[in-house]
Amino acid sequence: MKPEIDNDIFFFLRPQVENRIGETVIPGKVLLIFVEQGTANMSIDGESFAMDVDHMFFIHPRAELVLNEASADFKLAVVAVPNVMKESATLHMDISFFMFLVKKPCWEMDEKMRRMTKGFYNMFEYICHDLKAETKSDLITSLFVLFVRVLYEKARPMLPNEKPIGSIAGRTLISRFGKLLRTHFREDHRVAYYADLLCVTPKYLTQVVKQTVGVTPKDIIDRTLAIESVHQLKHSQLTIQQISGVLGFPDQSYFGRFFKRMFGISPLQFRQNPNMDVLQKLETSLLSKYPELEKFGLGKDKNE
């Protein structure tokens, strides 16, 4: 691992670790770390974890990583993707899974899961190193989404055991809001629309959501639209005007103002130079209003 992660959108590597012991690394990308042989010990945000072939690590971009020690035969494989890929992959999954990924970076694997993960990173390596550049992004995105979906299915039995946040009634309301949003976010962007479907007032929905997860329903709606906007601009062949219509904006101008408010650049500027880390601006913007979001793993980069 190196203290300044590669600027490529995504990459696969087998780093030399001998001279990296004791060095702090903040990846700046989502990392999936697989141990191929040997043993080691790594600290993630100050918490120590044993590393061996029975464990996989899912690391968020702002984590502080320190390799404390490693056996002489220690080898690992690292998959790195931009945060937007994780955002897109988890967009239609339970919000509790996103929190699970942040709080549970270490995954214990049985034999079946070891075979599955090895197949994943072998395929990832092949796409990165052996395919033409124009095909890589879409294939990597599809492969990563599939892998995260498998992790989601494996984690689902564990999600109810997470420490409850807020009242049962509040969590139920938010769960229903999330399901409606995943279905209808392209159709209507108003809090009042979802409150009406839930048979509550917009004020009550806002109060419950903010008290339970620390942000407003409007923030969640805007964040969902922003993530999908980035995905459409990066991966679809639709024009910007067509994308604005697909996402339910009145016109292209309105969509352009929304995108610039979210990211500081226009949709056209992003499409011409697609910076896949652009969603970090969204997290920083939310933090300026809701500092308590740090507890959900949305803290500012520690090296800022």
Image (cartoon, rainbow, N blue to C red):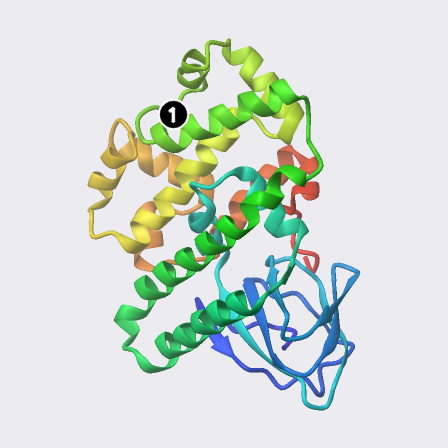
Point 72% across, 90% down: residue: 72
Rendered residue at 52%/43% (across/down): 282
Image spot of residue 208 (x, y percent): 61, 19
Name the side, left or right, on which 177 lies relative to 107: left
Figure check: 219 above or below 12: above
**Helix, strand or loop for disc 1:** loop
- Judge from the rendering whether residue 198 lies leftward or rightward of residue 28; answer left or right: left
Location of residue 303 (image quadrant): bottom right
Give, as a three-letter code, the residue at label 1: His
Q: Residue at x 62, y 64 (%)?
A: 57
Q: Position of residue 14 (x, y in %)?
A: 55, 82
| Residue at the disc numbered 1 | 189
Q: Residue at x 44, y 29 (%)?
A: 179
Q: Nearer the viewer, residue 22 or 139?
A: 139
How busy is the neighbourhood of tag 1: few (under 14 within 10 Å), some, or many (20 plus)? Answer: some
Q: Position of residue 237 (x, y in %)?
A: 20, 52
Pinpoint residue 273: horizontal percent, then vertical percent: 35, 60
Q: Is residue 85 above or below residue 10?
A: above
Query: Measured along the vertical axis of the image, is residue 153 above or below residue 169?
Result: below
56 or 296: nearer the eye? 56
- Outermost front residue: 111
